[in-house]
Image: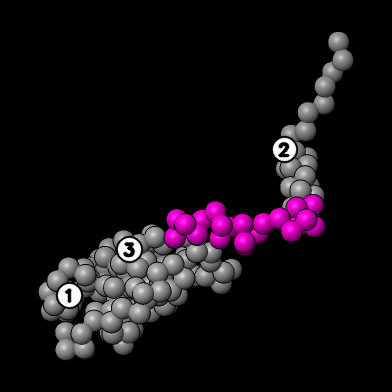
């Protein structure tokens, strides 16, 4: 009986990658959707914008939160005034900022807390979560999927500094 040779491990990976590269180049030659346009077509309706290499690197720091609650100290008045839109900085860091389809809700919460306050919270965070950079990241992604939410502003009289 004739013995069959089956690629495995690195050889199989190289074969699959090579075939994928040839397929993509072939499709691009005929103007088919590939790469970022294909990503946008597939995931845009799910409100999942692409991230840049720099943003991807920054994400490790975004997830350092240990839920100590320190950044919520002094936030009671803003939380009360928001009527539920702003559940505090810790909830923003741990919940809404972590789900891109929810970034419009995260931006509506952020509208209640000035960036200078976020910077102050960042200075006192025990795990050095870059809260200001996280807020900017969330705003920039929300602007891509829900521009009306990205423009959210809380009434200035309701945002104690
Ligand atoms: S202070 Fe830092 S570690 Fe503590 S809850 Fe806030 S973001 Fe998380």
What colour scheme governs how the chains and residues are painted in the rendered image of this protein? one colour
State the SS at label 3: helix
- Please tell me how crowded label 1 is: few (under 14), some (14-19), or many (20+) other residues with Cα within 10 Å: many
Q: Which residue lies furthest to the top in this view?
A: 1
* Magenta segment: 26-47
Q: Name the residue under label 1.
A: 82
Q: Mark 2 points at which residue?
A: 9
Q: Which of marks 1 and 3 is in front?
A: 1
Label 1 vs label 3: CA separation?
16 Å
Chain-order first, disc 1 or disc 2: 2
| Residue 96 numbered tag | 3
**Predominant secondary structure, magenta span:** helix
Please identify the quarter of the rendering in which residue 36 is found: bottom right
State the SS at label 1: helix
Vertical position of residue 108 compared to residue 98: above or below: below
Q: Which percent across, then down, holds residue 88?
A: 22, 71
Residue 34 painted magenta? yes
- Residue behind label 2 places its C-beta within 8 angstroms of ligand 1: no
Name the residue located 82 percent from the left edge and 26 percent from the top edge: 5
Label 1 vs label 2: CA separation?
55 Å
- Please tell me how crowded label 2 is: few (under 14), some (14-19), or many (20+) other residues with Cα within 10 Å: few
Label 2 vs label 3: CA separation?
39 Å
Vertical position of residue 17 compared to residue 86: above or below: above
Q: Which percent across, then down, holds residue 98?
A: 38, 61
Q: Which of marks 1 and 2 is in front?
A: 1
Name the residue located 17 percent from the left edge and 75 percent from the top edge: 82
Residue 94 is left or right of residue 6, and the answer is left
Residue 109 is left or right of residue 148, and the answer is left
- Please tell me how crowded label 3 is: few (under 14), some (14-19), or many (20+) other residues with Cα within 10 Å: some
Name the residue located 17 percent from the left edge and 78 percent from the top edge: 78
Q: Which percent across, then down, holds residue 111?
A: 28, 79
């Amino acid at each position: 009986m004739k013995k069959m040779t089956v690629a495995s491990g690195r050889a199989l990976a190289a074969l699959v990658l090579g075939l994928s590269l040839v397929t993509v180049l072939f499709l691009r030659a005929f103007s088919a959707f590939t790469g970022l346009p294909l990503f946008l077509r597939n995931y845009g309706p799910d409100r999942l914008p692409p991230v840049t290499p720099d943003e991807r690197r920054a994400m490790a720091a975004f997830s350092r939160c240990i839920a100590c609650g320190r950044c919520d100290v002094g936030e009671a008045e803003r939380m009360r005034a928001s009527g539920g839109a702003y559940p505090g900085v810790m909830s923003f860091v741990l919940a809404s900022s972590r789900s891109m389809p929810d970034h419009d809700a995260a931006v509506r919460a952020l509208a209640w807390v000035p960036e200078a306050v976020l910077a102050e919270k960042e200075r006192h965070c025990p795990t050095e979560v870059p809260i200001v950079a996280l807020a900017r990241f969330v705003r920039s992604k929300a602007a891509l999927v829900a521009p009306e939410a990205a423009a959210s502003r809380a009434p200035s009289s309701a945002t104690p500094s």
